[in-house]
Amino acid sequence: MLNMVVCVSGGGTNLQAILDAMKEGRIQDSRILAVVSNNASAYGLKRAEMAGIDGICLSPKDYDTREEFNQAFCEKMKRLKPDLIVLAGFLVNIPPRMVKEFAGRIINIHPSLIPSFCGTGFYGLKVHEGALRRGVKITGATVHFVDEGTDTGPILCQKAVEVKEGDTPESLQRRVMEEAEWIILPQVIQEIAQGRIRIGEEQEGLKR
Ligand code: GRF
């Protein structure tokens, strides 16, 4: 049984894709222990509630210092004891000690083909604004392990999406979600659940 914690900050459509995949048997032998959000009004917490999953709100705003938040976040995660932490649109930097403690056990979905349009400042719509500004004809999404950098960990899976004439950042974001994110994130989780992707070890970029 793969025990997961999913972290969200917003709409939670990637969380919903995971929940749907679990319901439809496209993800097996897995369980979401809790959904964690830094944003009390994140619809992702509502999705968790509707699915009967514990929702936990932990926001840096509730702590005097970032160090205190990091401490609380790490303690909470250690108590939950997940095999895998899934960052599904989570906009808070993961504390370095959590990256270390859960080395090879944290994955993230990013809405571009890394190494394009990623790193500091590239999140949400800004990713798609960058792609449209550069005029790329193909973009997509990436699932990768989380390391101490931003969007720099070993890549696990990518899926390409066509940029269409007249696309806006919003229309492109929607297509990348529908045609890439919501497909590859559940796919990677299933491969981890089946042991076809190894977790918890030093990963130097996976040969699959
Ligand atoms: C998605 O585009 C995801 O790739 C990015 O943030 C967005 C979150 O969307 N990290 P949602 O909360 O899963 O709907």
Image (cartoon, helix red, strand yellow):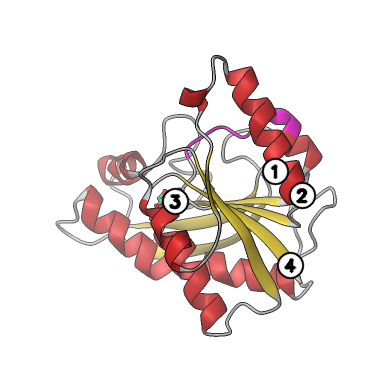
Q: Say what amino acid the circle numbered 2 marks.
A: Gly
Pointer 2 residue: 104
Q: Which residue is mark 4?
A: 2
Q: State whether label 2 is within 8 Å of ligand 1.
A: no
Instruction: Name the element at disc 2.
Output: loop
Which residue bears the numbered disc 3? Answer: 112
Q: Are marks 1 and 2 in contact (CB under 8 Å)?
A: no
Numbered tag placed on residue 120 in the rendering: none
Circle 1 sits on which residue? 77
Quadrant in the picture for the N terminus: bottom right
Nearest to N terminus: mark 4 or mark 1: 4
Which mark's residue is nearer the viewer, 3 or 1? 1
Q: Position of residue 143 (x, y in %)?
A: 57, 56
In primary-sequence order, the first of circles 4 and 3 is 4
Membership of 113 in magenta stretch: no
Query: Along the polypeptide, which appears first: circle 4 or circle 2?
Result: 4
Q: Amino acid at mark 4?
A: Leu
Question: Label 2 neighbourhood size at 10 Å, few (<14), some (14-19), many (20+)?
Answer: many
Amino acid carrying mark 3 in the image: Ser
Residue span colored magenta? 91-97
Taking depth in this image into account, of 171 and 92 the one nearest to the observer is 92
Which of the two labelled residues, at mark 3 and mark 1, occupies the earlier sequence position? 1
Residue occupying the point 48% across, 29% down: 120
Determine the residue positioned at 42% across, 39% down. Answer: 39
Labels 4, 2: front one: 4
Density class for disc 4 (Cα within 10 Å; few <14, some 14-19, many ≥20) is some
The stretch drawn in magenta includes residue 95: yes
Q: Cβ(mark 4) to ligand 1 < 8 Å?
A: no
User: Few, some or many C-alpha atoms within 10 Å of disc 3 (few <14, some 14-19, many ≥20)?
Assistant: many
Q: Is residue 6 left or right of residue 162?
A: right
Q: Estimate the spatial distance between the alpha carbons at disc 3 and disc 1, rounded to whole Å.
A: 28 Å
